[in-house]
Each structure stands twice: as C-alpha cells, then as structure tokens.
C-alpha cells in the first residue's frame, strides 16, 4: 500500500491525518492521538495494530475480581488469553447507558479500570431492520473508491441493497478523561476495534491509558461516537451524521469474593542491569539534579496553520478545510494535533500492479497520483531514523554542508516555521544529510528492501539514481529535550528541508509547552527508573523477560497535574529503552522522574 494511497484512504474513510512518512504508515502507526476543541477527527485502527505493550502496576494483596466480565472475555478472545486473565483482576463497572445517533443505538455495556488503563465493550444496533452494520475489519480491507467489495463485505452490501437499507460503519473511541472531579483532558493511548455478531449487531471495544489516567474513585469518560454510510463505491463524501460526544460517569469496583493475592515474581537486585546502558540527560539536569514543570496547553494546528507556510503555488483543490491539494500537486492534511505534507507529480500509477503480477491477475486497475522523488527521499531518511532494515545500520550525519544547503540553513527554515506555529519546547534530536551520493546508495538498498527483499510495496519504484544536487537536503527530527525515538512520537516534528524549502513534514503535537509550573527538589535516579522497569515487568499483563537495557533518557511528556483541576503539565520522565528476550527490536517504557510512576 503506497503512502499516498494510504493517506487518501485514511482521509476519505476515517478523516484521519496522523500519518508517518513511512512506506506503510497505517501499519506503522501505533498511537492514536486525540482531537481537541471541536468535534474530534475520527480514526479507526484494529487492536492488533494499536494496542501497545502495557506494563501493569498490580498491588500485592489485591483480590481477583470473580465475575463474568464481558471486557475480559472480549479482549482475551480478540487480543490474547493472557490479557483477558489479567483484566479479570481489575475494577469493573456495569454501565448499560445508551445513546442514539444516525439510526444506530450505542450501548456501553461494561468497562474495566486497571493500572492507568480503561478497557470497554459495548453493542451497536441498527434501529431500522433494513440497515446493515459493517465491521471495521471489512471496512478497512475495502479500499475506498479504489477497490471492489469482496466476500463478506460484498454479501453485506447486497443484503443492504436488497432490503432497501443503508450499509453503515460505526465508531466509538475515548476522547477525554476526568478523574474524581478533575478537569477533562485528552486521552493518551487509544485503540478501537469492533466485530459483527450473528444477530447483525456490532460489539465495539476500546482501550485508553496513559498519564491522563490515575487511580481514583469516580471516572468520567468522553466518547466520540459516529455513524458513516457506505455505498458500493465507498463511503459517501457528504456525511450527514456528525460525531457526537457521549460522556459517561462510573465508579468501578473490585469484586472480592476470594481474597487471593496476585502472584508476583520478584526479581533479585543482582538480576537487574542497573549499569552499562547509554545515559541521555540535558545539561540543566547534570547541574541541578532536577528540571522544571511546564503547563501543557492543548494545541490545535487547524486553527493556526496557513497553507502558504508549506507551499506557495496556490490551492488547486480543497477537499475540506483541513485537506487540500496545491497547484504543484503537493498535499497538506491537518488535524488538531497533527500536520502531514508531501509532494506528488501529475503522473498517475496503478497501485494494483503488484497484486496483478502476483496472485490476482484479474484485479481492476486503480490509478493514483505518483509520489514525487522528494517524497521517496524523505521516506528513505525516515526509514533510517526508524531502523527500518539493515541498510539503515550505521548511517548517521556526516556532512553539515551540502551543495546548495547547509545544516544550519535547514534548521533555520524549520525553526522559522515552528515560530510561526507557536510551537515551544522542541529541540533538534536527530539529523541526516541526504547528499546525492547517499540518495543513490541508500535508494538502491531501499528499493531492494521493498521490491526484492523482505518488504512489500505496491508503490512505483523510484529512480533514485536520477537525483541531482537540487534534491539534496536534511531530514530533521525535533522532540522535547532533543531525545531521539521518544516512546510513541506523540510530541515529535519530522521534516525534510532542501534548498527549495520544506518538501515533506509529519508533525505531532497534542500539547504545547506553556509557562513554568514549579520545580521538584530532585528527581529519581536513572538507576531507580531501571529498577522500576524490572519490578513492573513482573506484574506485566503480557509475559516478558528483559534481555538488556539499551538506553535511559530524560525527556518531557504531558501528565496530569497534582491538582486535578489544573489539567496537564509537561513533566520530566525517564524513558527506558530495552530489549526483550528473543526480540530483535527495542521497546520502551516511561517512568515519572518525580515519583517513579509508570504511564500505564
């Protein structure tokens, strides 16, 4: 699936624009940033793509909840049995509240709270028996205006057509959270998934967690619900049903029929790797042993961005206020918390070409705009940053001056834009020079990976050997405190700058840094953060074993303020990068540098 095709599918199907500059951003994206202010931008991603490794904090002596939990059963079935068992020791609340929207009745059946995570299941039913509900897996697999429905999707489409009803998809995802009367703030992680039942209803589920949540008594959850109508050609563009915010309040409890403590595997101190890892801390911490807190202010790109800041060729087509194509074929897509910009050509390509050459020779052509070479170059650099394949190993910044642009000039272009956007608290974390020679060399390896190696792409193969000095530039990554590979990239700015200016950008910023809000006397040590990791691995919802700790870095993330009415603050957090036994790639966990609490 190409980046353009993926962006177009996300934009048209679910009005999403939180997209990475990677070959398949839909599969790579594991974070669901949440919309703010007005009705939220909608997103749908299967649990298998969204649910991240969550480290549980299970207190000794907590009793198992002995009940027939719909949440535990659903997550155990559709994620894994171990997760279902883990959820059974959480706090449960039976909800039963219903809201109607667009001819569909949404009923939230049950939620479980456990270890800074809320897990919920509910039922969606069409109120008109003629209408048919389409589950998200079928919808996601049915390319909008780019493929024909097959199998079960085709059967449901015919069922709705025969009955004279509508084919509908639904959405229900967590938008904001309040705890014990505190202010409602954006959720951290969020994922949604729904499946079709034999009676035609859908069981929907969601998971949310992070520093916006904390142990409390009464929780308020603002859910965004939506209904979309589909036709044989794809979802209608004129969407008559607008998202609705549905707020529920609940007090989850543990049912303690049997006082059985959770089994905890204690890890001896001598088995913990407390040294031998890379330590990344700012100079201010080295001098004082602490860092200040800052107010975290909700940020909205849609109210600030001016298209001409990215492209001055003029707007050729405006599909919506937040999605537009320029006269030179570049595309700009906005949501409150994200920006995505990339260049295309006026040529078309058939993105079904590779499938046709494979096991589906009869698939109809589907034409989409061809990616510009600049987009391919940015994708290569982004792949290096993400450690995409062997070709990325050992590649690093070598030249601070290219033929027509220097690193300082690229930084100035980027930071001038940040000033216009009013973005604060970001520092350069990583940079890569893409010279003509590097574009040629890495481009050949990149093509080999995607078209001959272990990768798979149906995008047109770029001719990177055709790159000239005009295509040279720098790929820049900005993060809080300049820490590379921040846990989930939710506060991260990535862009490619050539002598022509910014040719691609992927910005994520849910909160902007505000005024200083006090300074802790001291922060916990990196060794204590590593110790917390080992302790919590023993309580994790998924069995795992740490093979090595690779890096411990101090960065900022938004967390709920001590005073629940004060919303969120940027606070120092230790990010621990580690490898699990038997795993090639590193994982990360975060622990508050103030008190050692984990994010989830």
Image (cartoon, rainbow, N blue to C red):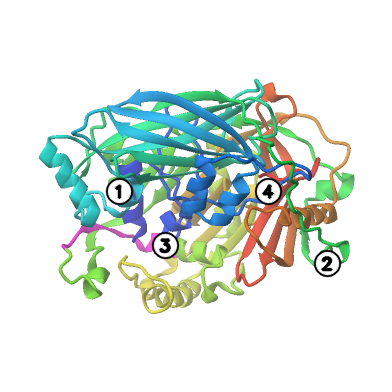
Q: Is the Cβ of the residue at disc 2 closer than 8 Å to that at disc 3?
A: no
Task: Say if 87 sits above or below 468 in the image.
Answer: above
Foreground residue among 93 and 132: 93
**Mark 4 or 3, nearer chain start:** 3
The reply to whether residue 48 is visible in this rendering is: yes
Label 1, residues with CA under 10 Å away: few <14, some 14-19, many ≥20: some
**Mark 1 or 4, nearer chain start:** 4
Label 4, residues with CA under 10 Å away: few <14, some 14-19, many ≥20: many
Q: Is residue 24 left or right of residue 169?
A: right
Q: CA distance from mark 2 to mark 3?
A: 39 Å
**Where does residue 302 sit, x and y in percent of width and height?**
44, 33
- Asked which secondary structure carries label 1, the reply is helix
**Where does residue 11 sit, x and y in percent of width and height?**
34, 44
- Asked which secondary structure carries label 4, the reply is loop
Disc 4: which residue: 56
Task: Say if 468 sits above or below 202 in the image.
Answer: below
Q: Is the Cβ of the residue at disc 4 closer than 8 Å to that at disc 3?
A: no
**Where does residue 67 sit, x and y in percent of width and height?**
58, 39
Q: Going 38% across and 76% down the picture, which residue do you hit?
A: 465
**Where does residue 127 sit, x and y in percent of width and height?**
27, 28
Label 2, residues with CA under 10 Å away: few <14, some 14-19, many ≥20: few
Disc 2: which residue: 271
* Range covered by the magenta-colored residues: 364-377
Quarter of the picture holding the N terminus: bottom left
Disc 3: which residue: 23
**Mark 1 or 2, nearer chain start:** 1
Disc 1: which residue: 139
Foreground residue among 39 and 286: 39
Foreground residue among 495 and 19: 19
Q: Is the Cβ of the residue at disc 4 closer than 8 Å to that at disc 2?
A: no
């Amino acid at each position: 699936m190409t980046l353009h095709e993926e962006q177009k599918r996300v934009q048209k199907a679910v009005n999403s624009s939180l997209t990475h500059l990677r070959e398949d951003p839909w599969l790579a994206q594991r974070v669901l940033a949440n919309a703010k202010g007005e009705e939220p931008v909608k997103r749908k991603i299967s649990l298998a793509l969204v649910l991240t490794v969550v480290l549980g904090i299970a207190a000794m002596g907590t009793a198992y909840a002995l009940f027939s939990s719909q949440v535990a059963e659903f997550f155990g079935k559709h994620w894994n049995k171990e997760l279902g068992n883990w959820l059974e020791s959480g706090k449960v609340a039976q909800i039963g509240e219903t809201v109607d929207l667009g001819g569909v009745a949404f009923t939230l059946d049950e939620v479980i709270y456990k270890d800074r995570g809320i897990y919920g299941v509910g039922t969606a039913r069409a109120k008109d028996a003629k209408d048919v509900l389409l589950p998200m897996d079928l919808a996601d697999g049915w390319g909008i205006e780019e493929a024909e429905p097959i199998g079960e999707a085709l059967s449901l489409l015919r069922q709705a057509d025969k009955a004279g009803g509508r084919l509908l998809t639904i959405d229900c995802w967590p938008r904001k959270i309040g705890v014990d009367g505190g202010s409602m703030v954006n959720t951290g992680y969020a994922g949604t998934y729904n499946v079709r039942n034999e009676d035609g209803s859908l069981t929907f589920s969601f998971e949310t967690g992070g520093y916006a949540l904390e142990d409390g008594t009464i929780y308020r959850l603002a859910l965004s619900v939506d209904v979309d109508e589909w036709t044989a050609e794809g979802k209608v563009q004129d969407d008559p049903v607008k998202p609705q915010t549905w707020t529920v309040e609940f007090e989850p409890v543990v049912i303690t029929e049997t006082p059985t403590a959770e089994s905890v595997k204690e890890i001896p101190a001598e088995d913990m790797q407390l040294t031998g890892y890379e330590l990344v801390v700012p100079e201010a911490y080295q001098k004082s042993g602490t860092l200040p807190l800052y107010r975290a202010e909700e940020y909205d790109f849609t109210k600030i961005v001016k298209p001409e800041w990215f492209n001055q060729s003029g707007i050729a087509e405006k599909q919506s206020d937040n999605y537009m194509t320029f006269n030179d074929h570049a595309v700009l897509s906005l949501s409150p918390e994200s920006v995505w910009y990339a260049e295309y050509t006026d040529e078309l390509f058939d993105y079904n070409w590779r499938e046709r050459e494979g096991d589906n020779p009869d698939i109809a052509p589907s034409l989409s705009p061809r990616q510009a070479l600049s987009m391919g170059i940015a994708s290569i650099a982004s792949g290096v940053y993400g450690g995409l394949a062997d070709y990325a190993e050992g590649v690093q910044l070598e030249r601070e001056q290219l033929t027509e642009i220097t690193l300082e000039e690229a930084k100035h272009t980027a930071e001038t834009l940040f000033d216009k956007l009013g973005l604060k608290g970001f520092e350069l974390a990583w940079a890569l020079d893409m010279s003509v020679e590097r574009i040629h060399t890495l481009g050949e390896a990149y093509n080999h990976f995607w078209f001959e190696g272990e990768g798979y792409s149906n995008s047109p193969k770029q001719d990177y050997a055709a790159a000239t000095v005009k295509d040279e530039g720098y790929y820049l990554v900005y993060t809080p405190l300049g820490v590379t590979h921040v846990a989930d990239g939710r506060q991260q700015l990535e862009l490619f700058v050539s002598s022509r200016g910014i040719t691609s950008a992927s910005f994520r910023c849910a909160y902007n840094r505000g005024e200083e809000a006090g300074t802790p006397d001291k922060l916990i040590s990196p060794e204590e953060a590593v110790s917390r990791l080992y302790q919590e691995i023993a309580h994790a919802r998924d069995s795992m074993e740490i093979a090595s700790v690779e890096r411990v870095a101090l960065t900022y993330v938004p967390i709920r303020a001590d005073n629940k009415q004060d919303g969120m603050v940027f606070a120092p957090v230790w990010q621990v990068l580690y490898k699990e036994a038997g795993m090639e790639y590193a994982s990360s966990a975060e622990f508050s540098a103030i008190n050692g609490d984990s994010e989830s």
